[in-house]
Image (cartoon, rainbow, N blue to C red):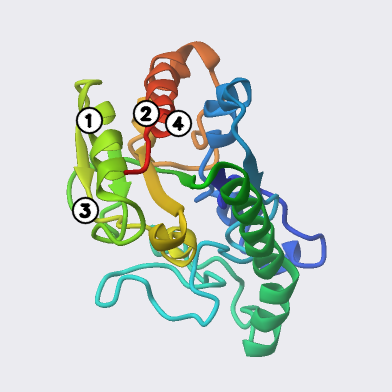
């Protein structure tokens, strides 16, 4: 089962005037991830995604607002800045606690309710289920991490959200591509992986954060004219082929 919490770009009309610009409010989406993984439909894989922009509410954050990466720079449940530290809202237009709670009830809770229901259905049918949480980010975001991000960033919250053999299977499939990878590096898994990953009851969760350079050309300094780079199926095809094999490793994996 694939989760896609950050592919949405929808911003309600009543909120749009409060943002600095529509482009900035959509800048940090996981661009084209739904298209990159479109092949998964042929693999009988369930896909759950939300249409709402992460700038409205980030459904991969702890609903309490607690940071998943204490001591590290990150964005909030209802972000007020971009990954690069630019303000998202016009001065004084940021959501207050009451509005954040309303957004949580409207978008975050239904998304995770859908994940919970589908995970239970698949686990009851098959005995176990793998939740593969799909993400991407620009290769260079100095505010969030140093240097260039590896191509594949596998997150299992230090091995707690899935069986160790599944983590190894995904790691080996990534290594076979010859591209760079890291396990539980800067991105160890967000709320989706940590909340739903319950290997003790047959629900195994793993996050895959991709560096965008694997499937699009990244501008050195993203602006409204250059980002996001238009979707190009031919440009993305090599990475999509690798991802197909990585998902196959998940499907082929058997519990002990």
Q: Residue at x 61, y 46 (%)?
A: 122
Q: CA distance from mark 2 to mark 4?
A: 5 Å
Residues at circles 1 and 2 in contact by the CB criterion of under 8 Å: yes
Q: Residue at x 62, y 88 (%)?
A: 97
Residue 103 position within the rendered picture, expressed as x and y whole percent measured from the top left: 70, 74
* Mark before the other along the chain sequence, 3 or 4: 3
Quarter of the image where one finds residue 225: top right
Q: CA distance from mark 3 to mark 4?
A: 24 Å
Q: Which residue is mark 4?
A: 251
Q: Which residue is mark 1?
A: 172
* Mark before the other along the chain sequence, 3 or 1: 1
Disc nearest the viewer among 1 and 4: 4
Secondary element type, mark 1: helix
Q: Residues within 10 Å of mark 1 (few under 14, many from 20)?
A: some
Residue 215 position within the rendered picture, expressed as x and y whole percent measured from the top left: 42, 25
Q: CA distance from mark 1 to mark 2?
A: 9 Å
Tag of residue 27: none
Residues at circles 3 and 4 in contact by the CB criterion of under 8 Å: no
Residue 79 position within the rendered picture, expressed as x and y whole percent measured from the top left: 52, 69
Residues at circles 2 and 4 in contact by the CB criterion of under 8 Å: yes
Q: Is residue 42 visible to us here? A: yes
Q: CA distance from mark 1 to mark 4?
A: 14 Å
Q: Is residue 76 above or below residue 173?
A: below
Secondary element type, mark 3: loop
Tag of residue 185: 3
């Amino acid at each position: 089962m694939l989760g896609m919490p950050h592919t949405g770009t929808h911003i309600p009309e009543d909120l749009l005037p409060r943002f600095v610009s529509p482009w900035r409010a959509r800048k940090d989406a996981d661009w084209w991830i739904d298209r990159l993984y479109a092949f998964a439909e042929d693999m009988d894989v369930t896909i759950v995604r939300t249409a709402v922009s992460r700038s409205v509410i980030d459904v991969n954050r702890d609903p309490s607002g607690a940071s998943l990466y204490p001591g590290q720079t990150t964005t909030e449940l209802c972000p007020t800045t971009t990954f690069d530290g630019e303000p998202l809202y016009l001065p004084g237009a940021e959501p207050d606690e009451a509005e954040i709670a309303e957004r949580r009830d409207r978008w975050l809770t239904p998304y995770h309710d859908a994940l919970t229901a589908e995970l239970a259905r698949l686990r009851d049918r098959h005995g176990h289920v793998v939740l593969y949480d799909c993400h991407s980010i620009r290769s260079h975001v100095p505010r969030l991490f140093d240097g260039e991000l590896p191509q594949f960033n596998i997150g299992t919250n230090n091995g707690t959200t899935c069986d160790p053999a599944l983590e190894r299977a995904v790691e080996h499939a990534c290594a076979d591509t010859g591209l760079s990878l890291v396990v539980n590096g800067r991105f160890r898994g967000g709320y989706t992986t940590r909340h739903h990953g319950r290997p003790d009851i047959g629900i195994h969760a793993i996050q895959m954060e991709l560096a965008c350079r694997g499937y699009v050309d990244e501008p050195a300094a993203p602006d409204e004219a250059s980002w996001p780079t238009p979707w190009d199926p031919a440009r993305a095809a090599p990475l999509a082929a690798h991802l197909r094999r990585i998902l196959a490793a998940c499907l082929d994996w058997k519990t002990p």
